[in-house]
Image: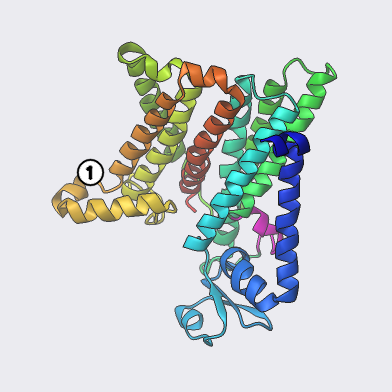
Amino acid sequence: MDVIDRIGAVRLWVAAFLASVAGLATGSTLAHRTVYDGFIWRYFWGPVAADAHNAQCAINDGESVTYGYADAVCTGVPSDAFVATPGYTAVSEVGYMIVGLFFLLGVILLLRRLNLGHNRNLFFGLVPFMLFGGVLRVVEDANDSVMGPNFGGEALIPYPTNTLLISPIIYFTVFFVTLGALLSSVALSRRDYVDSYPKTLGIIGAVLFVLTFASLIIVSVLRDSVGFYPSFLLVTVGLASVIAYGIYWLAERFAPEINRGTGYIGLVVVWSHAIDGVANVLASDWSDVFGLPFGYVPKHPANATVISITDSVLPASVTDVIGTSWPFLLIKIVVAVAIVWLFTDDFMEESPRYAIVMLMAIAAVGLGPGTRDMIRATFGI
C-alpha cells in the first residue's frame, strides 16, 4: 500500500495498461506467428473478423486470411493454419474477464480522481447507455441480415467499421462513448451550464438510444430482411416491469431489508435481469405467438444450457406446453434479488463509489444482452 500511495493508483493503472500493450506489441513483432496469429488473432481478433464478414470461420495460414462460408471449407484446412469461428472460446472469455475487471478498476479510479460516484443519480444517468449498447449491437445483426443468403444486399456498415459493433469490441465502443458523455456532462455542470450532470448524462444516453432505435425502424421499412414486431417489445417490457415491481413491492412489505440499501437502484437491477430473462423465454418458446419469422436460437450461453437441461429432465408433454426456457428467467430473478440483498445500508454508506460502480456493472450484464435479444426479436432478425 505504501508503494501505491507514493506512486499513485492512477499512475500505476496507466503504467500497467501501457506495459501490457507494449508487451503484446513486442511479442507480435518478435514472434508474430506465435503471439499474434496463434494467440491474439486466433482467440480475439479472428472471431470478430469472421463475425464481421458474416462467415462461418476465418482461416489464417500465416500468409493471408480467408473466410469460409461452408463447413467443408472450415474443416478442410492445413494442420498448421489457425481457424477462428464467431463467438467466444474459453481462452477469450478468461481474457475478456480480466480486461473487464481491469477497466472496471480504471472506472473506479477515474471517478475517485474526479470526485464523482457519491451521487446515486449517476446510476440512473447511465441506464440509457445500457439500452443504447444493446440496440447498437442489433444494428450489426441487421447488417448481417441484409447480407444474408436470401437477400445478398450491400452491407449497411462495411468491414472493418462494423467490427466496432461486434462483441466484445462493442463494449469498448459503448464504454468510450459513455465516458465522453460523462466527462462532457461533468464539465457542463462544473461550469454551471447545467444543474445536474447525471440528468444531462441520462438525456445524452436517451437521445443516442432513440436515434439508434429509429435507425432500425428506417431499415425495417427499406429492407425486406428486417421486419417489425412491436408486440414483442411491448409484452417483454410489460412483463419484466410487472415482475420487477411485484418483487420490489413484496420485498418492501415482507422483507424490507432486501431493498433498504439500494432502494430504487435495486428495482432497476432486478428489472434489467427480468428484461433479459423474459426476452429469452418469449423468443425461445413463444416466437410463433408473435409471428416471428424464425426459430430463435439463444445467444445467451447460460440460456442454451438451461434449455438443454430442462429438455432432458422434463417430458415432452410438459415442455410442449410450458416451454424449456422459463427456468432461465427464474434463475436470473433469484440471482438478481440475492445480489441486491448483499448491498446493505452499511456497505452503501461505507463504499458508495465502489457500490454504485458494481451495481452499474451488474445491471449492465442483464440489460445489455437483454436489450439486444428483445430488440433483435422485435425486428425479426
Q: Which image quarter is the N terminus in?
A: top right
Q: Which residue is mark 1?
A: 322
Q: Horizontal and vertical percent for residue 376?
A: 50, 48
Disc 1 marks which amino acid?
A: Ile
Q: Taking 188 as reference, is 223 left or right?
A: left
Instruction: State the extent of the magenta-drawn residues as a range.
Output: 155-166
Q: Residue furthest top?
A: 253
Identify the residue at horizontal 63%, vertical 35% (top origin). 210
Residue in the foreground of this view, choosing between 213 and 310: 310
Residue at coordinates 78% horizontally, 18% vertically from top-left? 194
Query: For residue 62, what is the image quadrant?
Result: bottom right
Residue 163 lies within the magenta run: yes
Percent position of residue 275, x then y? 44, 36
Of helix, strand and loop, which one carries label 1? helix
The furthest residue to the front = 2
Q: Is residue 93 left or right of residue 335?
A: right
x then y, percent, for residue 314: 17, 50
User: Residue 344: horizontal and vertical position, in percent?
Assistant: 45, 20
